Structure formats: C-alpha cells, structure tokens
Image (cartoon, rainbow, N blue to C red):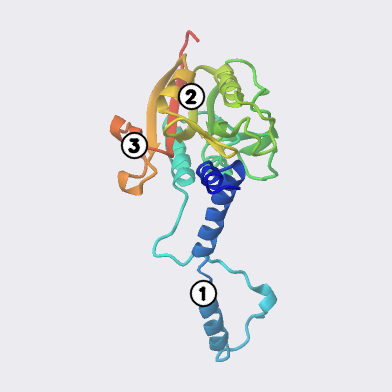
Amino acid sequence: MTLNSISGYTKKPTFIFTLLYVFGKEFLLFFDKLNLGSFLIDLFRFKRLLRNYEDRFIFNWRDLYPCFKDKSEETPFDRHYVYHPAWAARVLARTKPQFHIDISSSLHFSTLVSSFIPVRFFDYRPVDLNLTNFCSKSADLLSLPFETSSIQSLSCMHVVEHVGLGRYGDPLDPEGDLKAVAELKRVVAADGDLLFVVPVGVPRIMFNAHRIYSPEQIESLFSGFDLLEFALIPENPSDGGLVIQPSQKLVASQKYGCGCFWFRKKHDT
C-alpha cells in the first residue's frame, strides 16, 4: 500500500469508520457525564458519618444505587416531553370535550387529563392502569378502530415521527408517517379537534430515532383542517418555554424544536 493510497483511503471514511466515530463519541460523553468521582467521595463520607448514628436502616454494598446525573444546580427535564403535554392539557381545558381519545402519546398526559376529562388511551401495546375516567385499549395507528369522522377530540403527540422507522419493532416503511396522518384525518369528526405534535426544524430523518419536519410540511399534510394554534418549544431555553404563534425567524432557527399543532376539521372535508 502506497502513501498515496493511504491518503486517499483516509479522505473517504468508510461506513465502519462513521459508526465508530458516532458510537465512540457517545461512549466518551457518557463517561464524562457520569460524575463517578463525586459519587465515590460522597459514598465514603456518608459511610463514615453513619458510624455516629443508630442503625435505623441496613446499609449494604449490594444495595448501591448510583444516580450520577442528579447533582445539578437546576432540576433537569426534557423540554419536549414536559412542555408539549402541558400545552395540550391547556387546550383541553379550553375546549372541554365530553371525552378525549389519545393515540400513543405520553401516559403522563392521559392519566393527568383523566382527572377532569374522561380519557380513552389507545396504543399498539395497551397499558394495565386502573384509574377512574381512564381506559386503555389496543389499536394500530395505521388502521384505527373508529368510524370515519367520528371523534370530536383526538390527540397524537410525538408519535407519528417514529412510524415506519422500526425503532419500536414496527415494519419499515418510508411513508409510514403519511399513512398514520391519513388515519388521524379520517377519524376526526367535522368541527373536531386534533392535537398533533412532532419535532420541527430542517426536514430530515434521524434513523432510526425519528423524523424532523418543517411546520409547512405539517400544514400541507393536514389539508381540510384549519390550524387554530401553533406553539413552538424552542431547543434553546433562552428563546422561551412554550412560545405561542412564534415568529418565522425563531421557527427557521430550529434544528430540533418541538411543534405543537391544534387543528380543527372543516365541515366540507
């Protein structure tokens, strides 16, 4: 192998090198964030302190349960998954439907909303939860068990972007998201509300995690619906928390923001 061939080889990283780079970077970031040294110092300090107190609890090395990421100045949270259910719950507090149907969104959302609105939660894998005003059944998002134009209040949030990528064992289908959207549109009643949430930014596929859409793509998918409200959860906290009717400039700056769409189905659809 000549020097020129080596140079040419390194200028064209192979698929394997790309994988090594991606996973190697994640591996290093993981250990950097572990905060292992601080945990060990606290462990031995606490063990010494215990000697001065009565034995109210068993302290066994086998029971260690390290939580490396919790020592922070502020409480960390996932901006997408805290803000978007809060947005949806506020919409439902305004619309006050007789009951609400959710397709595979956050269980925290459905269970909390069920305290003031009866909720029927549908997922490919139904959940065994026992709460008043809450029930769960099995459903396939690509073939929903509802009559056409039958649902007055429906939500499907942070779900459709995954359909067809195989992440959750579903069949690979590049148009899985389009088929899911078609089903959601089919079952919503005239004048019915749909709360729909997906990542927004420059349109791309982050295989096999999710797709990212532009707001314009989503609006075009929901022809026959009026967009009553668009809320953005910016990726940068300094840009705000839940921004209702954000500026075009803010929307255009997103790489992985969260778009919250409140649609209402037109009568003539």
User: In whole angstroms, how far apart are the C-alphas of marks 1 and 3?
Assistant: 38 Å
Residue 69 visible in the shown view? no
Question: Which residue position holds label 3?
Answer: 253
Q: Nearer the viewer, residue 131 or 242?
A: 242
Q: Earlier in the sequence, mark 1 or mark 3?
A: 1
* 268 to the left or right of 162: left
Q: Nearer the viewer, residue 167 or 117?
A: 167
User: In whole angstroms, how far apart are the C-alphas of marks 2 and 3?
Assistant: 29 Å
SS for callout 2: strand
Q: Which mark is residue 37?
A: 1
User: In whole angstroms, how far apart are the C-alphas of marks 2 and 1?
Assistant: 51 Å
SS for callout 1: helix
x 42%, y 28%: residue: 214
Q: Amino acid at mark 2?
A: Asp
Q: Amino acid at mark 1?
A: Gly
Give the percent coordinates (x, y) of residue 232: 38, 36
Quarter residue 124 falls in: top right
